[in-house]
Image: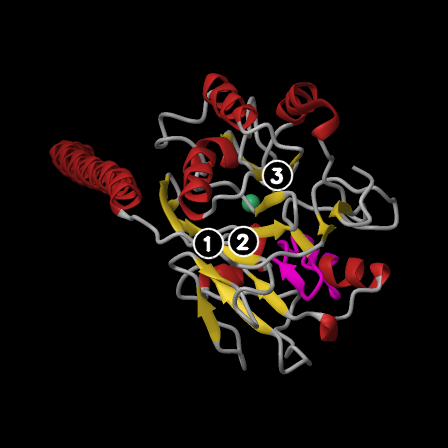
Amino acid sequence: METAVATAAGASAPACEFHGDNLKRRLVTILSLLLILLLVSGGWYLHTQQQGRERAVRLFAQFKPAPLPDIGSTRSLRILPLLEYRSARPDLLTEVGISYLVETDSQRILYDVGQNSRGIRPSALERNMATLGVELESIDTVFISHNHLDHVGGLNWQNNNTFSLGAEQKPFPNPRTQLIVPGSMSYPGMTPITAEQPMAIGPGIGSTGLASTGSIGRQLAIGWIEEHSLVVMVEGLGGVIIVACGHQPVPNLLKRYDDLFEAPLYGIIGGLHFPVPEGRIRLGPVDVQRQLASGEGLLSPLSAAEVDRQLAMLQQYQPRVIGVSPHDSSDEVIARAEQLFGSAYRHIRVGEAIVIGESAAQ
Ligand SMILES: [Fe+2]
C-alpha cells in the first residue's frame, strides 16, 4: 500500500511540471501575439493619423475656391440657440450639443440638431422647439454642419450618416424644406444638397445672402471629419460666419472666408473648439474634446498657447459681433474671449437671440 502511494506520488510530479511548463509556454505565446497585435495596430493607427494630417494640409493648400462675389444680402439676421450647453431660461434644456434657428429676411434655417444626450422622447431639441414656438413646418432649410454626434442627434444617427431631431426621423412637413449637408449624408424623403465646395444657398441664388464655406477636412484622433459653416451677408455690415464645432480649424475657416468674400467679416458665432484646459466630455481619464477631437493627434492636444494664437488672429479681424459656443470651449476661454472682445462679445445661450442688422441694438 505504501509502495503504491509512493509510486503514484513519484509519477505525478513530472506530469505537473510538464503541464505547468506547457501552460507557461501557451501564456507566453498568447501574450507575445497580443503584444505584436497591439504594436501593429498602434503603428497602423499612427501611420493613418499622419497620412490624414498630411492629406488635410495638402487638400486645403491645393483647393483654390472660386469667389462668391454676389450671394445677395439680408437686412436682418437673428440667431436663436435652440440647444446649447448654457441656457438663458430655466425652462429650456441644455446639453453638449448645438442647434440654432437662423432667421434672415427670406429664410428660416435649422442649423444642426443637437445630440439628444438624455435619450428622451420628445428630445431636448423637440421640447425646446415646442417651448420656443418653433414649428418644423416653418423651416425652409436644414443645414447640417458635420457628422458628429453632438450635431446630428446622437451616435446612432452619426453611425448611419444621417441625423434626427429626436428618437425617430419624422418627415419634414413642408415640401419646400431643403437639406444642405457637408458630405455623404442623407435623410428619408429628402434630396440632400452636398456642400463639398463653397456655394450660394437659394432659392434664388444671389438673393438670400446665404452661402456655405464648403467642407474643410481635418484629421482628428477619432477620425477624419469634414465640416462646413454658414455665411450670412448682412446688408451694409458684412459677413457673419455661423460655425458649429470649429474643426476646420479657425485659421482655415478665416482664410476660406477671405478667399470667398470681399466684404469684411462682421461677426463669428458658434463653436470654435477651444476645450482648454479641459473639455465638456470625459470618457474615464480621457478628455474627449481636447484629446480626441482637437489638436494634431492623440499626443498633441490643443494647447493654451495655440488658443491664444487663434484668438489673436480673430482679433485682427476686429469682429463687431463674436460669440463662442460653450459646448466645445471651456469657461476659461469664454471668459478670455469676453475680456478680449469687450462689447462685441455675445453669450450663446438657449432661448436668447443674437440679433444683427436691422432692428438690432448695435
Ligand atoms: Fe460640436
Count residues near mark 3 (Cα–Cα under 10 Å), then give few for <14, some for 14-19, many for 20+: many
Taking the image as shown, residue 227 lies to the left or right of residue 28, namely right
For the residue marked with disc 3, what is the amino acid? Tyr
Q: Between disc 2 and disc 1, whose residue precedes?
A: 1
Q: Between disc 1 and disc 3, whose residue precedes?
A: 1
Quarter placement of the N terminus: top left
The answer to whether residue 111 is magenta is yes
For the residue marked with disc 2, what is the amino acid? Leu
Report the disc number at residue 96. none
Question: Which residue is nearer to you in this view: 128 or 267?
Answer: 267
Taking the image as shown, residue 93 lies to the left or right of residue 213, namely right
Percent x, y for residue 343? Answer: 75, 26
- Callout 2–callout 1 Cβ contact below 8 Å: no
Residue 35 seen in this snapshot: yes
Q: CA distance from mark 2 to mark 1?
A: 34 Å
The quadrant holding residue 349 is top right
For the residue marked with disc 1, what is the amino acid? Pro
The quadrant holding residue 42 is top left
> Foreground mark, 1 or 3?
1
Q: CA distance from mark 1 to mark 3?
A: 16 Å
User: Which contiguous range is marked in magenta?
Assistant: 102-124
Q: Please tell me which residue is depicted at 65% across the width and 50% down the height of the picture.
A: 235
Residue at which label 1 appears: 69
The answer to whether residue 146 is magenta is no
Q: Secondary structure at mark 2?
A: helix
Residue at which label 3 appears: 266
Q: Secondary structure at mark 1?
A: loop
Percent x, y for residue 174? Answer: 67, 80
Residue 224 seen in this snapshot: no
Residue at which label 2 appears: 149
- Image position of 234 with respect to 13: above or below: below
